Amino acid sequence: MTSGTAIGRVRGLGPSNEGTHHWLHQRITAGSNLALMLWFMVSIALLPGYSLEIARDWIASTWVAVPLILLIISVVYHFRLGLQVVIEDYQQGESRVILLVLLNYFSAAVAVTAIFSILKIAFTPGAA
């Protein structure tokens, strides 16, 4: 028949064998979201005012634009991971695949739009 023990035959044969990877990414993005959101809230609170010019000058700073882009990437990736779990757990059939594809496109569109907006402000002459 087969060689080895029962546990040896089962080990490593989970449903997709990627649960740990997904779980780890959710925890890493949760930690980075916490740190970057804390930075964001403190930075906003320390602004001298909340006019459009002050906000534009603040975003144009390299020390603000880079963490803002990292925040966008982390939040959108964490959002995608969380909704992927919900879709995989509660949808069956072809609708699952369609929703996962739509989720990926939506996440990419949100991230690209936000990052483009930050970069446009950061690279506009005279903004800083």
Image (tube, rainbow, N blue to C red):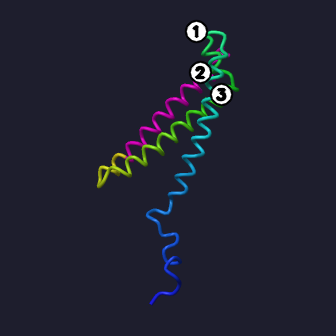
What is the magenta range? 100-128
Mark 1 or mark 3, whichever is nearer to me? 3
- Residue found at the very far bottom of the displayed protein: 1
Q: Which residue is mark 2?
A: 121
Residue at image coords 58%, 9%: 51
Dot 2 and dot 3 residues touching (CB under 8 Å): no
Q: In the rendering, which numbered label is found on residue 19? A: none
* Residue 128 placement: quadrant: top right
**Above-or-below relation of 71 to 104:** above
Which residue is at a point 42% across and 41% down the rendered structure image? 105
Q: Residues within 10 Å of mark 1 (few under 14, many from 20)?
A: few
Three-letter code for the amino acid on which mark 1 is drawn: Ser
Residue at the disc numbered 3: 39
Q: Earlier in the sequence, mark 2 or mark 3?
A: 3
Quarter of the figure with residue 60: top right
User: Would you name the residue on which mark 1 appears?
Assistant: 51
Dots 1 and 2: beta carbons under 8 Å? no
With 120 as the anchor, is 103 left or right in this view?
left
Q: Is residue 91 magenta?
A: no
- Prevailing secondary structure class for the magenta stretch in the rendered image: helix
Residue 34, x across and y down, in percent: 60, 35
Residue 112 falls left or right of residue 127? left
Among numbered discs 1 and 2, the one appearing first in the sequence: 1
- Would residue 101 be counted in the magenta stretch? yes
Q: Amino acid at mark 3?
A: Trp
Q: Which residue: 38% across, 51% down?
A: 88
Q: Nearer the viewer, mark 1 or mark 2?
A: 1
Q: Is residue 98 left or right of residue 60?
A: left
